[in-house]
Image (cartoon, grey):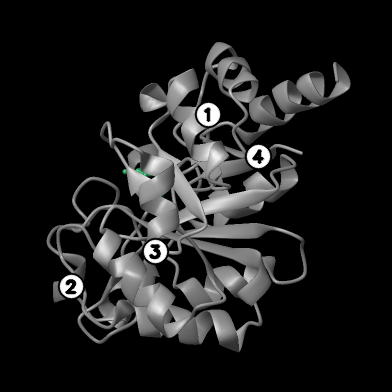
Amino acid sequence: MIKNFAHRGFSGKYPENTLLAFEKAVEAGADGIELDVQLTKDGEVVIIHDETIDRTTDGKGFVADYTYDELKKIDASYIYKNHYGFNKIPTLKEYFTLIKDTKIITNIELKTGINEYLGIEKKVFEIIQEFHMEDRVIVSSFNHYSILRMKALAPKIKCGFLSETWIIDAGKYTKFFGIECYHPHFAMLTKEIAREIKAQGIEINTWTVNTEEDMRDLISKGVDILIGNYPDITKKIISEAEGQK
Ligand code: G3P
Ligand code: MG
């Protein structure tokens, strides 16, 4: 069964990486939610895509230069010009509190590619344990060293290597390091590449898939999870494909 994950929540219609976008993803019938985490100055794990708050909020500067008390006063939905009222930058703990009584699986993307945020893996693992989410998370990152750190301290947590490039033998590479999933950009997933990854027993979780045509094409290539901005559309296309089997 192919799974439908909402990228940054239902970000096609609602302010990305906010509790509102996560709630709407659940309502739209998503099986899972992908979100991005960074660390504040005082070590709080917060959900925001960029290293700075400039693009998505009414503030300016680096996440790492703010304490969480300062950051929570900033509007993460300001791009929508008050259409959705005030929406704060959520913490990972607030997110888990929101979804803990659902069946939602969470893909936590560690944004450790630019700022390494040393120690973030341990903090994230502790929060996963606090909420008993060990069986309902996939931790991914473009920084594969960060994923190896997570795997070393939490061998039972499912992990994924993110990639936005043409890695040769991605399946072998992923398996060699004992990682369960490969998360390629969808445009870099040819039939041959998908076959090689599946032959190694690795899950393929691909992003950011927003058109019906791409969804159908990727389903035909045997992907496991479609991560996209429109979980309502993804749900419809997956149901159609499952119905044809
Ligand atoms: O995790 C998939 C995808 O979110 C990776 O890219 O930049 O949207 O975080 P980005
Ligand atoms: Mg992401």
- Provide residue 49's location: percent of width, then percent of height: 32, 53
Location of residue 37 by image quarter = bottom left
Q: Is residue 231 left or right of residue 74?
A: right
Labels 2, 3: front one: 2
In front: 55, or 162?
162
Q: Earlier in the sequence, mark 4 or mark 2?
A: 4
Q: Looking at the image, tell me whether mark 2 or mark 3 is earlier in sequence order.
A: 2
Q: Is residue 10 visible?
A: no
Residue type indicated by callout 1: Arg
Check disc 2 and report the residue beneath it: 64
Structural crowding at the residue carrying mark 3, measured as other residues with C-alpha within 10 Å and reported as few (<14), some (14–19) or many (≥20): many
Marks 3 & 4, CB-CB < 8 Å contact: no
Residue 199 picture location, percent across and down? 56, 38
Are discs 4 and 1 less than 8 Å apart at CB? no
Of helix, strand and loop, which one carries label 3? loop
Circle 1: element type: helix
Q: Is mark 1 within 8 Å of ligand 1?
A: no
Residue positioned 32% across, 76% down in the render: 149
Horizontal and vertical percent for residue 97? 63, 75
Quadrant containing the C terminus in the rendered view: top right
Under tag 4, what secondary structure? strand
Marker disc for residue 89? 3
Q: CA distance from mark 4 to mark 2?
A: 32 Å
CA gap between label 2 and label 3 equals 13 Å
First-in-chain label (4 vs 1)? 4
Q: Is residue 33 above or below residue 43?
A: above
- Mark 3 vs 4, N-terminal side: 4
Q: Which mark is residue 4?
A: 4
Amino acid type of the residue tagged 2 in the rendering: Ala
- Neighbourhood count class around disc 1 (C-alpha, 10 Å): few under 14, some 14–19, many 20 upward: some
Q: Are marks 2 and 3 in contact (CB under 8 Å)?
A: no
